[in-house]
């Protein structure tokens, strides 16, 4: 298929990431650019001048500590102010930040620090330090030093660099060239050992310039800001962090996601950045709460008005007078409460990492929050596509960002090339060669694009199910619809080489009490609910409704409700909330086979 490409003509790019950060914080020296919380969850404001001073102080400490240009330095922490300070300070001295997920195991720390030759790692907590310390004790490991953020590691580093001259730091900031490696980001990995994705300084500076233009309505609106709670070890949050800094938008940090709703309420973000599961949970919890209060019919009516209103916005005539009136009533009765949960000030939302689905996209736009769904992988530096603010097409992931060329292979796989993509897997030439096809990066995702370049993702190539009858089934559509039911946490659709499609379903432990109350049922545990006839009948009805979105050959015929969830903690979800299908299928193989017993 003919390739499509977006361009940014005549752009003069920053020489490296440091130039972006320094330039932005000079421009916004007296403006609040970052906000973090104290022990009482009150916001502490940081101006551009203060942020630059803190980064420079820590960077000088790194120089005094002996960190060399090109050296890899690890960061293992939740998303917090100190993460950004460390990230930018490591860049400032010409070194290479290597993020580690704060949920990393000892084996993962060992692998990443060894593969990236990390000798120093900054960790958040004593628990992290204990894990990393075990790795550092191994004489074969390059890791020699573990510094703890909670124990004042940044203050100590700043004090150590007090005698380093500004000119020494300025020299270090100028060293990195476009082609130099800016970071090595390890894929969260739904299969196998994480691969180190090398991203250059130019991949970032080009992307920042492209997004400043493509999303200017979002980035430069009055009072622009977001609460960052997605992990900065993931490429999406990392890129967004740099883009927001470049435009002077305010970043608030939420390390503890259990506090997200109250922090949203005091921060009032204009932009909500999240993965689809967060948008699903907000919707589902609102429905569950309505059911517990005996108002589920009103909620569903209001949700229907929101979706229909949004769908009508895409028609030539727009919403009718009658629909506008019903939408206004729905907003007054129900929708404004959900909008307020998200801070009550949002105009835009960006969803990435997995498909959102048109239903939720229309619901949130009907709520007053236009979701700009995007797409990308770590290898494409987080974002390759984005729906533009002025012309979103809900149900698609938008058009290519500047610098990215896209084509669809004969088998439907999405191929890309461009100078914002990675330059290879670290120490893994075989994997790099396997990922490329004549200069095109093979994304592993299947989809199609329209003549204007809007891309629709249909699923992962490796996840495509081929039934015994030869029917190709992309599980994502069904899984999305089944997860839409408030009681469902996760869903795995199976059926490869089997006579029909089946599913494993897990229950949402947080939603269960409210759901039971709304149904007039006595409290029960997840284990009890997984066997309860009423619960099973309700899940059955939800799956029957979900089956209406696909053909009969693609529909779920049998299912089992498990008494355990798929989570990050038990290693069935990646840190970006993607299901590790192979692990689930291996560990629950007997349960899957039981779904086909007697066939």
Image (cartoon, rainbow, N blue to C red):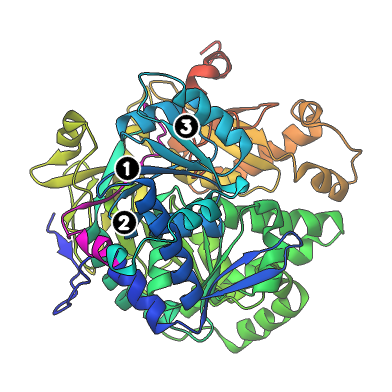
Image spot of residue 109 (x, y percent)? 45, 30
- Is residue 246 left or right of 329 when viewed as pictured? left
Image spot of residue 163 (x, y percent)? 40, 61
**Measuring 71% from the left and 57% from the top, which residue is drawn there?**
259
**Would you call the spot at circle 2 few (<14 residues within 10 Å), some (14-19), or many (20 or more)?**
many
Q: Considering depth in this image, is 367 or 93 the residue closer to the camera? A: 93
Residue 367 placement: quadrant = bottom right
Q: In this figure, which residue is indicated by the disc labeled 1? A: 72
Q: Earlier in the sequence, mark 2 or mark 3?
A: 2
**Measuring 69% from the left and 65% from the top, which residue is drawn there?**
263
Q: CA distance from mark 2 to mark 3?
A: 37 Å
**Are discs 1 and 3 less than 8 Å apart at CB?**
no
Q: CA distance from mark 1 to mark 2?
A: 11 Å
Picture disc at residue 580: 3
Q: Where is 222 relative to 248, above or below? A: below
Which residue is most to the front? 163
Magenta residues span 170-193
**Quick one: SS at disc 2?**
loop
Task: Tally the numbered discs.
Answer: 3
Q: In this figure, which residue is indicated by the disc labeled 2? A: 93
Image spot of residue 43 (x, y percent)? 67, 70
- Is residue 559 left or right of 393 when viewed as pictured? right
Q: Considering depth in this image, is 88 or 215 the residue closer to the camera? A: 88
Q: Is residue 466 visible?
A: no
């Amino acid at each position: 298929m003919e390739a499509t490409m977006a361009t940014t003509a005549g752009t003069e790019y920053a020489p490296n990431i440091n130039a972006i950060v320094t330039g932005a914080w000079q421009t916004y020296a007296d403006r609040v650019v970052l906000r973090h919380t104290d022990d009482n969850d009150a916001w502490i404001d940081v101006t551009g001048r203060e942020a630059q001073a803190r980064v420079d102080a820590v960077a000088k400490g790194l120089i005094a500590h002996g960190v060399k240009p090109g050296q890899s330095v690890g960061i293992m922490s939740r998303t917090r102010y100190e993460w950004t300070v460390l990230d930018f300070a490591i860049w400032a001295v010409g070194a290479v930040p290597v993020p580690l997920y704060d949920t990393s195991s000892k084996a993962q720390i060992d692998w990443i620090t060894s593969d990236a030759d990390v000798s120093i790692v900054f960790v958040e907590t004593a628990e992290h330090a204990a894990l990393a310390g075990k790795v550092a004790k191994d004489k074969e490991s390059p890791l020699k030093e573990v510094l703890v953020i909670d124990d004042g590691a940044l203050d100590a580093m700043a004090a150590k660099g007090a005698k380093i001259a500004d000119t020494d730091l300025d020299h270090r900031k100028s060293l990195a060239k476009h082609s130099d490696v800016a970071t090595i980001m390890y894929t969260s990995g739904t299969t196998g050992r994480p691969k180190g994705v090398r991203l250059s300084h130019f991949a970032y500076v080009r992307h920042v310039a492209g997004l400043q233009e493509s999303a200017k309505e979002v980035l430069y609106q009055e009072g622009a800001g977001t609460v960052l709670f997605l992990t900065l070890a993931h490429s999406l949050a990392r890129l967004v962090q740099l883009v927001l800094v470049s435009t002077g938008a305010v970043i608030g940090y939420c390390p503890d996601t259990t506090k997200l709703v109250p922090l949203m309420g005091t921060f009032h973000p204009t932009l909500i950045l999240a993965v689809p599961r967060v948008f699903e949970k907000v919707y589902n919890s609102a429905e569950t709460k309505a059911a517990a209060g005996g108002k589920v019919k009103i909620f569903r009516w209001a949700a229907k008005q929101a979706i229909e209103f949004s769908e009508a916005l895409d028609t030539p005539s727009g919403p009718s007078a009658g629909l506008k009136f019903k939408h206004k009533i729905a907003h007054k009765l129900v929708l404004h409460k959900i909008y307020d949960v998200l801070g009550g000030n949002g105009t835009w939302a960006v969803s990435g990492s997995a498909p959102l689905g048109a239903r939720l996209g229309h619901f949130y736009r009907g709520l007053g929050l236009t979701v700009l769904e995007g797409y990308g992988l770590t290898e494409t530096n987080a974002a390759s596509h984005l729906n533009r603010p002025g012309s979103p097409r809900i149900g698609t992931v938008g058009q290519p960002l500047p610098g990215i060329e896209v084509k669809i292979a004969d088998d439907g796989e999405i191929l890309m090339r461009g100078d914002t993509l990675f330059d290879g897997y670290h120490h893994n030439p075989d994997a790099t060669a396997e990922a490329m096809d004549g200069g095109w990066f093979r994304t592993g995702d299947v989809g199609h694009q329209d003549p204007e370049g809007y891309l629709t993702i249909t699923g992962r190539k490796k996840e495509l199910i081929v039934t015994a009858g030869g029917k190709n089934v992309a599980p994502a559509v069904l899984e999305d619809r089944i997860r839409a039911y408030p009681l469902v946490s996760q869903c795995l659709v199976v059926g490869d080489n089997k006579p029909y499609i089946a599913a494993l379903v897990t229950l949402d432990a947080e939603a269960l009490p409210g759901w039971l109350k709304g149904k007039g049922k006595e409290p029960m545990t997840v284990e009890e609910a997984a066997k309860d006839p009423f619960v099973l009948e309700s899940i059955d009805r939800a799956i029957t409704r979900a089956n209406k979105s696909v053909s009969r050959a693609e529909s779920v015929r049998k299912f089992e409700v498990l008494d355990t969830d798929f989570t990050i903690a038990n290693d069935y979800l990646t840190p970006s909330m993607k299901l590790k299908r192979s692990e689930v299928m291996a560990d629950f193989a007997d349960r899957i086979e039981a779904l086909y017993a007697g066939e």
